Amino acid sequence: MIEGLTEVLPELFYTVLAGGLTGLGVLAETASMQTITGGETTVGLWMAAIGLVALYAGFKLAREKGMLTA
């Protein structure tokens, strides 16, 4: 029972972390588009950069941990 749990918990942790980073990236990109169209170009570009970093981190984590194949 404990052996199975110790195998599942790290996978669950990395799945939740990768999903959270990807979701954060999507939210930051959406907010950046709204901010840019609202006239705040500098803040919008900063949010876009943060969103890209979060998206990249989420996808890289998912790929390295074997959650994505291709």
Image (cartoon, rainbow, N blue to C red):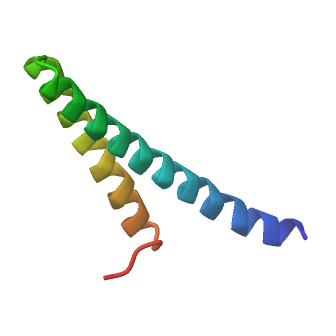
Q: Is 7 or 63 nearer to us in this picture?
A: 63
- Residue furthest front in the image: 38
Looking at the image, residue 49 sits to the left or right of residue 10; the answer is left
Compared to residue 52, the image places residue 41 above or below, namely: above
| Residue 64 position by quadrant | bottom left
- Give residue 24's position: percent from left, percent from top: 41, 40
> Which quadrant would residue 52 be assigned to in this image?
top left
| Quadrant into which the N terminus falls | bottom right
Q: Nearer the viewer, residue 10 or 20?
A: 20
| Quadrant in which the C terminus is drawn | bottom left
The residue shown at (43%, 47%) is 23
Q: Residue furthest right?
A: 1
Q: Position of residue 6 (x, y in %)?
A: 75, 63
Residue 39 point in image, percent of width and height: 11, 18
Residue shown at 27% from the left, 52% from the top: 56
Residue at the image point whose x is 13% and y is 28% from the top: 45
The answer to whether 62 is drawn above or below residue 44 in the figure is below
Instruction: Work out whether 57 lies above or below 70.
Output: above
Residue at x 70% of width, y 59% of height: 9
The residue closer to the viewer here, 24 or 18, is: 24
From the viewer's perspective, is 16 left or right of 27?
Answer: right
